Amino acid sequence: MGRMLNALSERALELGPARDAEPSGHFRISRDANNVVWMVLDRTDKRVNTIDRPVLEELAGHIERLETEKPAAIVIRSGKAAGFAAGADINQFVGASTAEIKAALEQGHQVLDRLAKLSCRTIAVIHGHCLGAGLELALACDRRIAVTNASLGFPEVMLGLHPGLGGTFRATAVADPIEAMTMMLTGRSMPAKRAKSIGLVDAVVEERHVAAAVEAAVSGDLSRKPKSFGGKAMGFRPARQFAARQMRKKTAEKARQEHYPAPFKLIDLWEEHGGDGKAMQRAEIRSFAELIETETSKNLVRVFFLREKMKGLKEGESAVEHLHVIGAGAMGGDIAAWAAAQGIRVTLGDIQVEAIGKAVAKAAKMFKAVLKDPLKIRDALDRLIPDPEGLGIAHADLVIEAAPEKIELKHKIYAGIEPKLKEGALLATNTSALPLEDLASGLSDPSRFVGLHFFNPVSRMQLVEIVRHGQISPETERRATAFAAEISRLPAPVASAPGFLVNRALTPYMAEALVLLDEGVEKERIDACAEEFGMPMGPIELTDQVGLDIALDVATSLRERLGEDALPAAPAWLTKMVEEKRLGRKTGRGLYDYDDDGKPKKAETSASGDAEMLDRLILPMLNAVVSCIGEGVITDEEVVDGAMIFGTGFAPFRGGPVHYARQRGVEAIVARMEELSAKYGPRFHPHPGWEKLKG
Amino acid sequence: MNSQPVYLVDGARTPFIKARGRPGPFTPVDLAVQCGRPLLLRQGFPVSAIDLVVLGCVNVVADEMNPARVASLRLGLSDEIPAFTVQINCGSGMQSIDTAFRYIERGTHEIVLAGGTEALSHSPLVLSSGAVEWFAALNRAKSVGERAKVFAQLKPGYLKPVIGLERGLTDPITDLNMGQTAEKLAHLFNVSRRDADAYAIESHRRLGEATKNGRLKEEMLPAIARDGTVYDHDDGIRPNTTVQDLAKLRPAFERPYGKVTPGNSSQITDGASWTILASEAAVEKYGLTPLARIVDSDWGGLDPSIMGLGPVTSVAPILRRQDMAVADVDLWELNEAFAAQVLSCVAALDQPEVADGVLGLEGRGGQIERDKLNVDGGAIALGHPVGTSGNRITLHLANALKRLGKKRGIATQCIGGGLGGAMLLEAA
């Protein structure tokens, strides 16, 4: 934003007469000449509004007063630039008893019911984020005016819950019920325009027309969209039963009921009570209180906080405005594109200009999926600058090398670029296999060298391992961590050790799957076994996805560095497949064959894995995680869990591998590993690090 | 007025991409962004040091009004930096340099980005005026009956759009196509078809040599389209074409006797070019290495039907002012709109009747040696994106002066409508 617009931006938000009102608690309230009361929610203690007990209690006090004062209308909006409200304060759920939660819920419902019953017209003005309890507050008003930048949603399902402050019955009553259900089931937010088309909001206006739109809403010129025929039909049980069946089917494609009960409970709730607001409200409270008790929800809330914790590892700013990426291969190209999508100016270098071309084409696809808006896509493409000459190196605040994993090549690259780096620039490597100490040797200033290990595909895998080494400066580590967070990825600081955390943990899991395959177990059965546990993808398919060549490389080098007892040897046929260029998904053939959409052709399998198979797959992974903690590769157990969830997709509803191990019992796991070790060999030998976990 | 020295410090262009009958991969601004980004990256001054952006463009597309401003913002320049587009038809890319030159010369500006861009493949299809009237009547019609009546008046010809580019290449005063003006010059200066074809062959050969020997490496930077296609060379070049090949081509504009063919005319291409002009103070402040100093520039005019002779009308006042003869100029970039037109310009400067009689050169005329003229080929080989060419030839002249260690050079071009533009550069 330029200086002029920036200087004027303070004026943009329309707050009516409340603009200059003195804050009273978390609200700023004032009445205009037409007896319209503007209530501006502007939490004094937070940068974004959240809806928690104190806010609801304050709101109750104001409603009580307004019940007697009888204004012409009430306008509720946020005074925060970021948006209306980010939802409920999740902290209030942590450690609360069921009774407390239920009491708080009932109290909240009473407040919103009173708001809904006010005799004067109530109008919510919504800009920016309007999520969860924020949206439930808006839904309790008579009219909703959305500003064009508004984004509305119910993310509760991500926490193993469904809306609990009236969202289920109000959203399905106000908006098209099928659309409202879909919104709650997926947890996805929708833009203002779409919200209007489903009836969730009544108008979409530019911020500059908010006052006029409010006036229209007060005078009755802003009418609600009449319910569609289909929407009315959902008042009838058979129609709902039919729709509910479809919803269950679709939901089951994405999540297993035994792992993620919340969406299924939401469907039950609506099928049973849809069309009867009072009954649905009572059922919602009951169902929500039950869900919040589930391990799934507790673990998903844990995951939410793990994410917050990892974001919070950022201290200060990275001061990276220009990123240069060396190597336009799959990873380099993806890192460059992602950073450009996040607003960073990026130069992408490669000795082959055609490789840069391919990366640009891939970036254009990523931008279309991630950014959607054609102007944003254009701007991101403009920021992603092909740079075959490496001109960007001299401008970059950070250079990420993503060249092939050959140490001589990397040394040569560093020798070429180090003299060109500008003062204060960081040099990073995306290596997943080479020791950083070896890479740093020969650098004239190893203190600015760091590992930034991204995961494939960068746009979906949120983790970045921030790899330190003996000569790194704390400032380099701090800035690298901040950079990862600034481009909306989650940093996990790790030491330079074989495989760092994620590859060290994943490799035994994939290697054991190959052993099982070698023993003659069907590959579909192996994958099904891991998926039943909650892994997003079975280990065989994952090996194909990673690429057999890379998987073999990583496994071989890890085995060399960790010792032969740590990992099973790769089967000979794997080497042969790599030689034959059957490399997995990228070549269309690997352990599976792939169709034109890149989907594996899997045979139907009725038999799934047994407990022993699962333990053979999962326990070596846990063992590797424990060895990383034991050896100081990564110290914070919560960050370990976060890293495994965001870097490998480790079953989020289990709260992470360490959490899972503790839940299952460290003693039991160690005993089980001893058993497996006796039966299958030393690779199952429990690491001494388990002892520390016992405490 | 105390005028300041002005330097051309750097510049770059995209490869010129042949228009192939449908919109090419880049719009005019896309092209300007493609070569502007790497050009700015290789500068020794921060982007914030740029005071002004001037861009020449003739065929502005509807989505990119004032392409200079759109390009400037898309290149990441501050929104506080003014940017405007200039248009003098085929001279627009040179007009931007001329404009930048004047701002710096008068001492108010230090660094100006001056370019030219053109995507001829994006020229719009235009409705005939009859069709436009018909659409307007349809819009005005209110009732179904009225609409039916208007529909009945639809003539099949209304559905045939006029190709905007064709109209753009036709002079409105004389209704002569540019190719026809070249035919007229060929007649007046007695240029043979064989000479024109031979000239064209040499243009392809020279560009081929220059490309092969890496002489364009700094000047021509690759462009990458959204679909990943890399454009890294001028794709209209045919270095292996022979005189025999060209002799087979039929006249493009005046059949059957015309001499101007697609083979001895400039090609229709898309492309952009930027130059960076800097004051002496800026050169010192940022330690820049100028390619050349801009000494003088001018424009001239004559009857639109012989527009191809424009260069001599713009060169003459410079030669007079600087008291130079044709022979004092070490290198010439004379834009190759048509081979016949280039050869006519060469002839005109050498004919006292024209040089002294009309241009008042008082004996300063003379023959431009072929080895000083368009040393690395020209628009016949690489194409003539109209708003870009003037910028390209000025930049290339600066590069060629430097490479060959020559002192003075003139870049000049003919301009549809009966104009010419010229710039005198001196090695810095």
Image: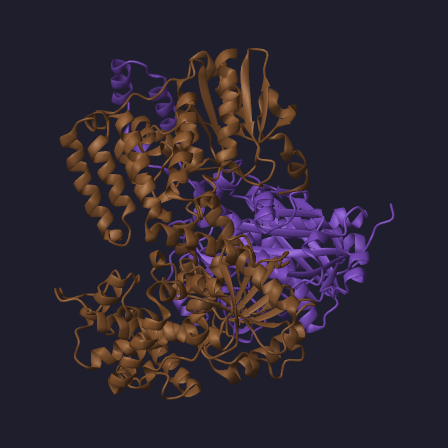
Left or right of residue A231, residue A50 in this image? right
* Residue shown at the point (53%, 28%) measured from the top left: A58
Quadrant that contains the N terminus of chain A: top right
**Where B200 sits versus A437, above or below?**
above
Left or right of residue A540, residue B291 in this image? right
> x, y (%) of residue B407?
75, 67
- Residue B361 visible within the image: no
Q: Quadrant of residue A238?
A: top left
Q: Nearer the viewer, residue A476 or B287?
A: A476
Quadrant that contains the C terminus of chain A: bottom left
**Where B420 sits versus A172, above or below?**
below
Q: Nearer the viewer, residue A683 or B361?
A: A683
Q: Nearer the viewer, residue A13 or A114?
A: A114
> x, y (%) of residue A328?
47, 68
Left or right of residue A560, residue A427 in this image? right
Colour given to chain B in the rendered image: purple
**Where A436 sits versus B111, above or below?**
below
Q: How is the image coloured?
A: by chain
> x, y (%) of residue A286?
30, 37
- Residue A121 visible within the image: yes
Numbered disc total: 0
Colour given to chain A in the rendered image: brown
> x, y (%) of residue A684?
32, 81
* Residue shown at the point (32%, 50%) measured from the top left: A294
**Where B415 sits versus A350, above or below?**
above
Question: Which residue lies most toward the right here?
Answer: B2
